[in-house]
Image (cartoon, grey):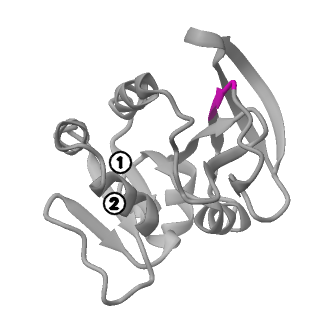
Amino acid sequence: MFFMLYFLVMITLYNAVSKDGYINEVNGSEDFVPYEVWHEFLELCTAYDVFAMGKNSYQAIQEYEPEERRLFESLPIKKVVISRDGNFTPQKGYEIIRSVSELPKLGKNILLSSGPSLNDVFLKEKLIDKIILNVIPVKVVSGLKQFSSKEPNMILKSEKNTQEGRVLCSYDVVY
């Protein structure tokens, strides 16, 4: 029964990335990502029933301006933090799971946005079905990439230009 569950679940990984492939700068900042991208991301979330993130992504969201955080937290989707830290407890309105294998049990249409360590785990477990990249037309030069290991074998499915030279790319993941 658990084996069949994976076939009914779709996990999409989303990251905003610089044109040279970084999801944040050396200091952890995402200042290169335009303000509009947050609102586009919130709209994207409405197409999913679960949003999953790592502990670091959760903590970054908690540092957002109160109104921006409120917009996210008021979305009618399940919000899940994945962390092996047994001492970590997110605030009310968030669920916590300790293993990526628990995520497919929480919904059928899951959006994941996380950093390289968690992205690598999902990739290794072959749980990512699709990748959406919001490519920001700036070079960051150094920081964190989307994956710390080799990137998956991807087939470009579609490409759509967005505002201000950004490109939204959608890939199906082939293992």
* Residue type at the position of mark 1: Val
Q: Quadrant of residue 165?
A: top right
Give the mark, 1 or 2, whose residue is nearer the N terminus: 1
Q: Which of 140 and 128 is in front in this view?
A: 140
User: How many residues crowd around disc 1 within 10 Å: few (fewer than 14), some, or many (20 or more)?
Assistant: many
Q: Main secondary structure of the magenta part?
A: strand
Q: Nearer the viewer, residue 161 or 165?
A: 165
Residue 85 higher or lower than 141, as above or below? below
Whole-percent x, y for residue 40 in the image: 42, 24
Give the residue number, with chain letter if any, for mark 1: 50
Give the residue number, with chain letter if any, for mark 2: 80
Residue extending farthest bottom:
86
Whole-percent x, y for residue 175 in the image: 82, 53
Q: Nearer the viewer, residue 86 or 106?
A: 86
Kindly indicate whether the residue at mark 2 contacts the one at mark 1 (C-beta within 8 angstroms). yes
Which residue is pictured at 41% across the width and 55% down the height? 52
Residues shaded magenta: 133-137
Tell me the tag on residue 91: none
* Residue type at the position of mark 2: Val
